[in-house]
Amino acid sequence: MIQHDVTIVGGGCVGLSTAKHLSEQTDLDIAILEKEHHLAAHQSGRNSGVLHPGFNYPPGSDKARFATDGTKRMKEYCGTHDIPCDELGVLVVAKNDREESHLQTLASQADANGVEYELLNSQKAIQAHEPHAVGQAAFYAPQAASVDSQQYVYALAREVQSAGVSLYTGHEVEAIESLSAGYLLTTSNSTIETSLLVNAAGLHADTLAQQVGVGDGYQVVPFRGEYYEVAPERTEVCRTMIYPTPDPELPFLGVHYTRRTDGKVIVGPNAVLAFGREAYHNTDVDLRELGETLSYGGFRRLLASKTMLSVAWSELNKSYRKQKFTEAAQRLVPSIREDDLQKSYAGIRAQLVTDDGKLVKDPLTIETDDAVHVLNAVSPGLTSSLPFGEHIATLISEKAVRA
Ligand SMILES: Cc1cc2nc3c(=O)[nH]c(=O)nc-3n(C[C@H](O)[C@H](O)[C@H](O)COP(=O)(O)OP(=O)(O)OC[C@H]3O[C@@H](n4cnc5c(N)ncnc54)[C@H](O)[C@@H]3O)c2cc1C
């Protein structure tokens, strides 16, 4: 039997950042259990790779605090660890009066959160930044950056291992049992006893939490985000990053253009119900997991809203009909053509939904005396990962002192 003081389930950016900060704050013996043999196989390595500097989030919210601080810290981290990170800036484009008025909200949030920005009120001003983008106004935030998220995850992994953290890959936690003190974890490869537990299992965090009676009232609903890559001869359509004006009702930012650190330009993601928690292709179906989603009252109540139903239909269309995806892309850059887009990768968001049918939009952790369960590491979870992991590490350090 292997024993550790703290065991973190999940070697994504949240689990690894927690381990990093915990190893800096304490002398505890820490382990990370990751089910895959390679890191960054799920959300932390399948995203847009954008550092969001905080203008999208209401002042005083955890998201605003973590994203603003996270952007600064991650840029420094990338600098010292030689991780590709380009401060390209982002252009949020408004296409009509309603969207233009929402840019004012972004501006006041940026003011309150200390984020630099510029409001552009003409097509000419937009084209000075992005010659192919078309809109009636835009919000420009120069501090947004494009980062290689996979290299970031691997850098964190190297750092924690040199700090003495045991990183077990290929160890899927299959069962968690509460002991009189601590937990017994049965994995696909071992049995581990731990005094303290961090559940940072992303798409599976709710299932693991519910094994020890935590997280009733919530379920992860997987939403796939698919990307297309712009053909190499057309990458001039996006110099930096071009986003639509976000709908404040939705936790997803909409189909956008991102220039990656390797020079590729990707377009996406949409947000379509995935027929399984790891159903990365629109032909993948996991019948058991799909059944769990469809029979979940919270999901059915979510879809009962007319707005959500129409969003779901439109996103489904973007997944199965390239022409519909192209139309979403053309809203920002009208000159992009269907033939310019080549199918690329997809990521799946672990979106927490409440039993009464609400999308949980903020990060959510649930604490017990000897555990922290990260139930909603919602976007911008990559941007936020350093301060968010530090916050979880502090909660665990306090529990270790009390134990
Ligand atoms: C399409 C998409 C685009 C996004 N774009 C951005 C963006 O541009 N900027 C941004 O800031 N954020 C973005 N995000 C959000 C960000 O990627 C996530 O918030 C963040 O990666 C969550 O990290 P995590 O460590 O919680 O999850 P994950 O990376 O999913 O890590 C969880 C880990 O737990 C492991 N695991 C699961 N179950 C078990 C088990 N039973 N035993 C052992 N291990 C287990 C998994 O294999 C996985 O490695 C995006 C997300 C998606 C999906």
Image (cartoon, grey):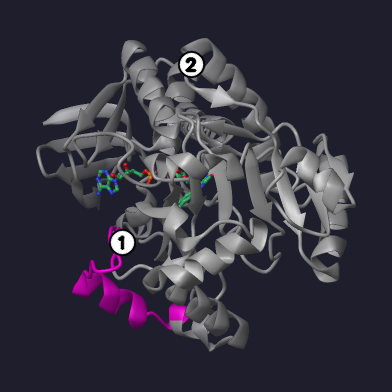
Magenta stretch, residue numbers? 276-299
Q: Is residue 251 visible?
A: no
- Beta carbon of the mark 1 residue lies under 8 A of ligand 1: no
Left or right of 92: which side holds 123?
Answer: right
| Disc 2: CA contacts within 10 A as few (<14), some (14-19) or many (>=20) | some
- Depth check, front residue: 211 or 150: 150
Image point 25% across, 38% down: which residue? 34
Residue 96 sits in which quadrant?
bottom right
Q: Is residue 230 above or below residue 115?
A: below
Give the label, 1 or 2, closer to the camera.
1
Tell me the residue that label 1 is attached to: 277
* Residue shown at the point (37%, 73%) measured from the top left: 320
The picture quadrant where one finds residue 370 is top left
Check residue 209 in the rendering and tell me which mark sits there, or answer none. Answer: none
Q: Please tell me the numbered disc located at residue 24.
A: 2
- 129 horizontally vs 48: left or right: right
Total labels drawn = 2
Examine the rendered structure and indicate whether residue 150 appears above or below residue 104.
above
Q: Tell me if residue 283 is in the magenta stretch.
A: yes
- Residue 296's x, y, as percent? 38, 79
Q: Pinpoint residue 138: horizontal percent, then vertical percent.
A: 80, 51
Instruction: Kindly identify the residue that appears in the image at 47 percent across and 78 percent down.
Output: 298
Q: Amino acid at mark 1?
A: Arg
**CB under 8 Å between callouts 1 and 2?**
no
Q: Is residue 163 left or right of residue 249?
A: left
* Residue 261 makes an appearance in the image: yes
Residue type marked 2: Glu
